[in-house]
Amino acid sequence: MLRDERKRGPGLCSAIFTILVIAGIAIGLYYWIFGNRVPGHVVLEADFEQGVVESVPNDTLGRMLLAKKLNLRDVVETLQEAATGDRVKGFVARVGQSNMRLAQVQEIRDAVIAFRKSGKPAIAYAETFGEFGPGNASYYLATAFDAIYLQPSGDLGLTGLIYEQPFVKGALEKLGIVPRIDGRKEYKSFRYLFTERRYIAPHREEVTEVMDSQFSQIVKAIAERRKFSEDGVRALVNKGPFLAQEAADAKLVDGLAYRDEVYDRIKEKAGANADFLSLADYRKRAGGPNEKGTTVALSY
């Protein structure tokens, strides 16, 4: 009997190994066949706190460092395609803290507004807008959505804009370095970083005009989306930052909720049978709108 048991041992191991291999192949085939499909009912999700990039470099290191970053062009095109796609039923995004530039925010914001025109719901949520620091750009993006939810322990850093400019002329003098930089007319201000100790009139005028223009765009957009007057928005900015309940009382957000509660609410609107799929995965499975035809060039 002992001899028979020893003979069965290797055979049993081989059988188990074979079953595991077959099971692995079956699972792999299942995901290969079905895992690349877009489900019948989808809610797209995105995390804009990780920021976006204009493009991913071709070098290996660049791809490794930026592999998980959202590509701005892909975000915009995917939302454009999703607006008309029958399978996409809604969009939810985390927008709290981000280092995106204002131009990038505006691109995505316009794409979200266009997505909403299809009648599909779009909800933004955040643990915090700025963590008691500037959260202007993130909140500006959030106002493109149907509803904004803030975590009860969070805050809203709607504080206005500030520009800071270092001047290194004093440091260069201590090092015995004399900068020789020319500029065309007085508003070519890059040289002032090296040639001045503080703002001079043309430099200050230029920076102030740019800042006022950007702030006016933010104020106007918030006023339109949140149903305030522009003077009302400016008054709120002067009172900021806000604790979560203060932001809700001021009607700057539509409610206080945690992430799971926000996801329950988008499911109520999109349908209980809807699956969540990231923008990046949806793009991979559904493809982009401009992938056919001959490519001449693409400049970022």
Image: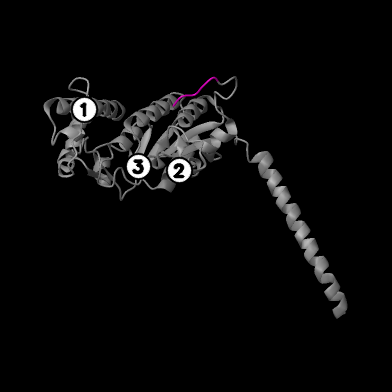
Quadrant housing residue 2: bottom right
Q: Choose between 13 and 247: the one closer to the eye.
A: 13
Q: CA distance from mark 1 to mark 2?
A: 48 Å
Pair 2/3: label in front: 3
Q: Could you tell me which residue is drawn at 74 percent across and 55 percent down?
A: 21
Amino acid type at image mark 3: Gly
Compared to 141, does 67 lie above or below?
Answer: below
> Badge 2 local density, few (<14 within 10 Å), some, or many (20+)?
some
- The residue carrying mark 2 is 263
Query: Residues at badges 3 and 1 in contact (C-beta under 8 Å)?
Result: no
Q: CA distance from mark 2 to mark 3?
A: 16 Å
Q: Choose between 108 and 267: the one closer to the eye.
A: 108
- The residue carrying mark 3 is 96
Q: Choose between 83 and 13: the one closer to the eye.
A: 13
Name the spot of residue 196 as percent of width and height, x first.
14, 34
> Badge 1 local density, few (<14 within 10 Å), some, or many (20+)?
some
Q: CA distance from mark 3 to mark 1?
A: 33 Å
State the extent of the magenta-drawn residues as a range.
Answer: 296-300
